[in-house]
Amino acid sequence: MANTILFAAVGLGLLSLWIWLLSLVIRALRKYICSGGVRREKEAACRSLGEALKKHRMERNMTQEFVAEALGVSRQAVSKWETGAADPSTSNLLALAKLFGIPAEELLREIG
């Protein structure tokens, strides 16, 4: 009899633990789903900056290597900026605008 009560108590404890974990997972999924707009907006902004940088570089027939040497960064850094994997620092953004012969405001205006 005592064993049956013990097993029932352990079973109820495990069941309540599973229900609690399931509720945490559901809340996390709900939060993730609701943040989709923010994630897409951030991705679009990064992609737009990369597209703007690549567009200006291509219009001036510059290679990634040339831009990298002019700014004193690696070609991989320029590639990451153009693909949206990373953003250039403020000083590099200003240097890019100067290299492209456009005001930094115009470059930033194209974002988003």
Image (cartoon, grey):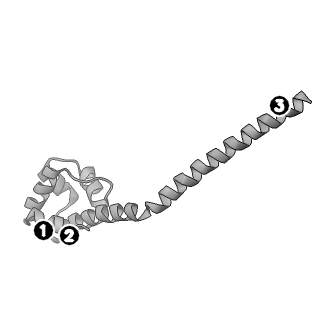
Quarter of the view holding residue 105: bottom left
Residue 95 x, y percent position in the rendering: 11, 55
Between the residue at mark 3 and the residue at mark 2, the CA separation in whole angstroms equals 67 Å
**Amino acid residing under circle 1:** Glu
Write the residue at 78% across / 38% down. 11
- Mark 1 neighbour class, 10 Å CA radius: few under 14, some 14 to 19, many 20 or more: few
Element under disc 1? helix
The residue to which callout 1 is attached is: 106
At label 2, which amino acid type do we have?
A: Glu
Most foreground residue, 11 or 72: 11
**Count of numbered tags:** 3
Q: Point out the tag, 3 or 2, that comes first from the N-terminus.
A: 3
Residue 6: which numbered mark, if any? 3
Q: Quick one: label 3, few (<14), some, or many (20+) residues within 10 Å?
A: few
Q: Which mark is residue 110?
A: 2
Check if mark 1's residue and mark 2's residue have beta carbons within 8 Å: yes
